[in-house]
Amino acid sequence: MNTFISEVIDFITNVMSNLGIISGFLLIILESMIPILPLAVFIGLNVITFGSFFGFLISWVATVIGCMISFFICRKLRDKFEKRYRGNKSISKFKKYINKLSYSNLVIILAVPFTPAFAINIGAGLSDIDAKRYFSALFIGKLPMVYFWGFIGKSLMESITDPYTIAQIIVMLILAYLVSKVVNKLVK
């Protein structure tokens, strides 16, 4: 079974290598809009195919672009959505929650690898959150998330059992939080 999986991964990475970095971008952007697709696998494939640095960079930029596209689509449909679900208390409560999020909390939510980014993009697009604020939070928050999934995608067991990797992820989360505090002062 391991040989079969290894051969499939080799085949996919060869195809991606032949198509170039655009294949890595498209996979990640597609995942941003279709949440059932496995982001960890796609980031892992980018890291394996294009190396740690370029695989990370491609995945990070594509994730931010994909989230921005989802945000804009939801922002464009916001008026229709509000007319249709005006009296729904759950939706109203969720929208208020998103609107009240501090900048640092938004960055942390976006940075946590298991947060459903698709739901956050929809919530932010339907809320009154400032687009510039959301995008700057994306740029900061997606760094540790992509870093985490890059390690997980490359080697699941190594990432989970290696204390150095876990420490790096924790440090990146703390740095994302601290950077968000500084940027929050600049954005206001």
Image: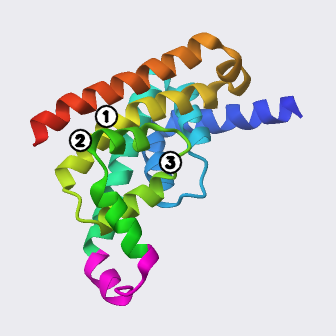
Q: Say the numbered circle drawn on residue 27.
A: 3
Residue 58 horizontal side relative to residue 116, left or right: left
Considering only vertical position in the picture, is 59 above or below 175? below
Question: Sequence-wise, which precedes: disc 2 or disc 3?
Answer: 3
Whether residue 117 sits left or right of residue 38 in the image: it is left
Q: Which residue is drawn at 39% across and 23% down?
A: 174
Residue at 40% across, 38% down: 108
Question: Sequence-wise, which precedes: disc 3 or disc 1?
Answer: 3
Q: Quadrant of residue 100?
A: bottom left
Q: How many labels does the image show?
A: 3
Read off the residue under disc 1.
Answer: 140
Query: Do we see residue 7 in this rendering?
Result: yes
Q: Which of 67 and 176 is in front in this view?
A: 176
Residue at image point 49% right, 40% down: 19
Label 3 – label 1 distance at C-alpha? 21 Å
Q: What residue type is labelled 3?
A: Leu
What residue would you read off at disc 2?
A: 136
Question: What colouring does the structure picture have?
Answer: rainbow
Secondary structure, magenta segment, majority class: helix
Q: What amino acid does circle 1 point to? A: Ile
**Callout 2: helix, strand or loop?**
helix
Cα gap from disc 2 to disc 3, whole angstroms: 23 Å
